[in-house]
Amino acid sequence: MKKLSRMLAVVMTAALLTAGASTALAARPDDAKVYADFNNGPMAEPEQTMQATDEGGALYINDGPIDAKAELSDGALKLTLGPTGYYGMQNGAVQFRDIDGKLTAYKYLVVRMKGEKGQENVSGNGVLMMSIGGGDGSHIGTFNAEAAGGPTPFLDPDGKTMPTITTEYQDFVIALTEDNVRKNPGKAVTGINFNNSVGQLTVYIDEIYLTNTVPEGYENNGSTPVTPPTTGSGNDTNSAPENNNGSGNNAANQNNTNTPSAGGSASSGMSTANVVMIIVVAVMVALNIIVLVYAILQLSKKR
């Protein structure tokens, strides 16, 4: 009986490890330029700075958060935004545009995030928005797939709207374009604002970084492809200063039809890796079941 108990314990441990392996996210790409990882507290008060990343740097928290609460939780930023919610930050060492207005050479901005309840970016639950570069203007995008009469949805490398937020961390990969990064003539653009315009939502942001590489294992859980129009930059060059503490409600009323044009395809390169991972996990689960059945049969024979 003791032998069977030990065997069952091994099987259960293997099953738990398998489940953990199947849900774990891959490490960030080697070329990642980390904007913030929220691993080093304490959480800064408005108009104060905190350590931006494990490597150092300073993350400045903008003045005047509105209808928002922020705290650190298990190495993540726990951010609650009400229906007029605004929360802004800046890392001066990471530029989305330089002082001459040139867009960063990085292709993607990645936000690793989960929700407290899930579906925080589904219509009716909230309208989670982000301003890449801070300020108000037509560059403000939303993580929601549906944004009729509102800000333009962010698109991933395959031209799809963002995945649905779940209670597990996932990577939101935003293709950077001339349209969705603020222009602020004569100033480097380094800020990020988060906004909400419907209900109350709480999200956990594990890290934010720039990269030229789609994260390994990236999946987009059911969002629909959007055909990008062939338009010019269409960015608002007269937006407020970068550390503008506006609530971002103007963003909810933006009707910008200049949908970002996302270059390249991610799913074709990652689908093979995903299939291989699924096969490996399935094989491990099957082996665990076989071992369990064998143990039960051996016990029955002894009886």
Image (spheres, rainbow, N blue to C red):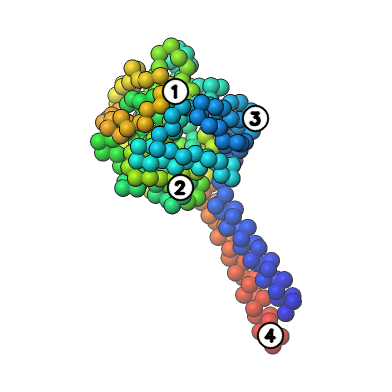
Q: Give the CA separation, mark 3 to mark 4.
A: 60 Å
Q: Amino acid at mark 2?
A: Gly
Question: Is residue 266 at least partly visible in the picture?
Answer: no
SS for dot 3: loop
Q: CA distance from mark 2 to mark 3?
A: 27 Å
Q: Of label 2 and label 4, which has the lower sequence position?
A: 2
The residue beneath circle 2 is: 115
Mark 2, secondary structure of its residue: strand
- Can you tell which of label 3 and label 4 is closer to the viewer? 3
What residue does disc 4 label?
301
Q: Secondary structure at mark 4?
A: helix
Q: Nearer the viewer, mark 1 or mark 3?
A: 1
Determine contact: label 1, label 3, CB under 8 Å: no
Mark 4: amino acid:
Lys
Answer yes or no: do the residues labelled 2 and 3 have beta carbons within 8 Å? no
Please give the name of the residue rendered at 61% of the width and 26% of the height, measured from the top-left corner.
57
66 left or right, relative to 4? left
Residue placed most toward the observer, 179 or 293: 179
Q: Pick whichever, 213 or 174, lies toward us.
A: 174
Question: What amino acid is at disc 3?
Answer: Glu
Label 2 or label 1, whichever comes before in sequence order: 2
Compare residues 138 and 107 and report the one nearer the observer.
138
